Image (cartoon, rainbow, N blue to C red):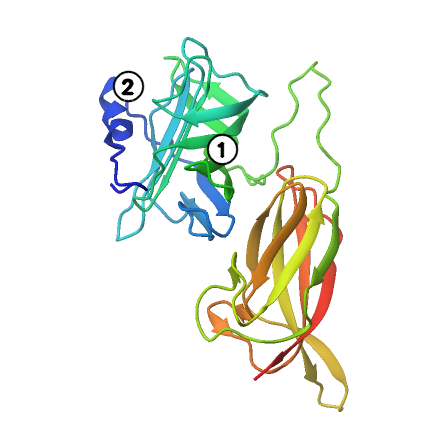
């Protein structure tokens, strides 16, 4: 198990002997999804997702003070481990946001713990926050269902890793990504405010596409263009590309290309380098437009934005 900086984090897996192993129940839906900003060590700037529809049941070691889940890496698939810990001596509370979290197992007194591992990559020093949206305990007081959103920064670096961990949501046909309803009698309103996506544009509209590498990057290369936008709240921004093509009757239309890219956006100004690539392929010379829509954790979506560009040889 590798970590940044070379130190091992075996202590996290070693905790397994202290609690009861409870695999995810049949007929329930579990998943881990996360998206890292370019430069994030854990995700390598990618959008990642694992579900029980693709993997064996997730392993669950959870209690009132700690939510911990592991996604098995069978068939050469990578491992995921997520861990959310209440401050020492406390129980986790539904609806509470735990800010200023540190690495689980090494947090200062009064601080909550957070830990995310993917494909053997882990952080020696962690900062971030998480929010417990739902948590249900079974007859033995072991947590059998939970839903948590999180943001983690590795080694105090600026790039963020944002995501969500869900364990054992019923597969009854309802949307597992929908936010849980407010508790009866609380009168807590559901977030229905759309995220605001604005000032969406490119630093240059004519550029060359990169021959290899990812679609997005932090540092500005000799190819591509700088993508800039602003968000009213933290949200996931999905990008798609359409190409201007001829019709059979000699007209023009926009054709949506296969593939998309996802960005973990933060409140305020955001900037990424778009390298003229999509779905692992270089865009051919031609005229295009880049489409963007933001979605917050409550699944509210912004208006669709677009900007035109041209790829040259």
Label 1 sits on a secondary structure element that is strand
Q: Residue at x 57, y 70 (%)?
A: 224
281 with respect to 140 (left or right): right
Q: Residue at x 42, y 52 (%)?
A: 44
Q: Is the residue 207 above or below the residue 221 in the image?
A: below
Which sits earlier in the primary sequence, circle 2 or circle 1? 2
From the top left corner, tell me how far across and down residue 11 is, in percent.
25, 27
Instruction: From the image, tell me which residue sits under label 1.
Output: 169
Disc 2: CA contacts within 10 A as few (<14), some (14-19) or many (>=20): few
From the top left corner, tell me how far across and down residue 163 is, in percent.
51, 40
Instruction: From the image, tell me which residue sits under label 2.
Output: 19
**Quarter in which the N terminus is drawn:** top left
What is the C-alpha distance between the residues marked 2 and 1?
22 Å
Residue at the farthest top position: 89
Q: Residue at x 59, y 21 (%)?
A: 95
Front residue of 149 and 178: 149
From the top left corner, tell me how far across and down residue 143 is, in percent.
41, 20
Q: Is the residue 61 above or below the residue 157 in the image?
A: above
From the top left corner, tell me how far across and down residue 27 is, in percent.
43, 36
Label 2 sits on a secondary structure element that is loop
Q: Residue at x 50, y 33 (%)?
A: 170
Q: Nearer the viewer, mark 2 or mark 1?
A: 2
Among the 4 quarters of the image, the one containing residue 249 = bottom right
Among the 4 quarters of the image, the one containing residue 107 = top left
Circles 2 and 1, Cβ within 8 Å, touching? The answer is no
**Quarter in which the C terminus is drawn:** bottom right
Front residue of 2 and 289: 2
Disc 1: CA contacts within 10 A as few (<14), some (14-19) or many (>=20): many
């Amino acid at each position: 198990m590798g970590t940044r900086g070379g130190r091992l984090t075996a202590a996290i897996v070693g905790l397994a002997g202290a609690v009861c192993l409870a695999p995810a129940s049949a007929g329930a839906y579990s998943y881990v999804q996360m998206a890292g900003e370019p430069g994030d060590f854990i995700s390598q700037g990618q959008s990642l997702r694992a579900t029980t529809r693709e993997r064996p049941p997730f392993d669950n070691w959870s209690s009132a003070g700690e939510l911990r889940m592991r996604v098995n890496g069978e068939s050469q698939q990578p491992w995921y481990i997520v861990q959310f810990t209440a401050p020492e001596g406390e129980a986790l509370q539904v609806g509470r946001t735990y800010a200023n979290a540190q690495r689980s197992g090494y947090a200062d007194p009064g601080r909550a713990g957070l830990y995310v591992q993917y494909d053997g990559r882990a952080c020696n020093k962690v900062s971030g926050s998480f929010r417990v949206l739902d948590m249900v305990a079974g007859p033995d007081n072991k947590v059998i269902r939970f839903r948590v959103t999180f943001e983690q920064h590795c080694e105090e670096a600026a790039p963020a890793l944002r995501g969500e961990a869900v364990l054992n949501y019923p597969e009854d046909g309802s949307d597992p990504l929908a936010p849980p309803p407010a508790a009866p009698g609380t009168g807590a309103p559901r977030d229905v405010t759309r995220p605001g996506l604005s000032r969406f544009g490119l630093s240059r509209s004519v550029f060359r596409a990169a021959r290899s590498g990812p679609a997005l990057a932090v540092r500005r290369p000799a190819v591509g263009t700088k993508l800039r936008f602003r968000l009213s709240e933290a949200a996931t921004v999905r990008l798609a590309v359409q190409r201007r093509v001829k019709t059979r009757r000699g007209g023009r239309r926009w054709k949506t290309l296969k593939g998309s890219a996802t960005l973990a956006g933060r409140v305020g100004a955001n900037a990424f380098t778009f390298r003229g690539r999509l779905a692992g392929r270089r865009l051919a010379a031609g005229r295009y437009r880049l489409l963007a829509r933001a979605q917050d954790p409550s699944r509210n979506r912004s208006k669709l934005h677009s900007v035109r560009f041209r790829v040259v040889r």
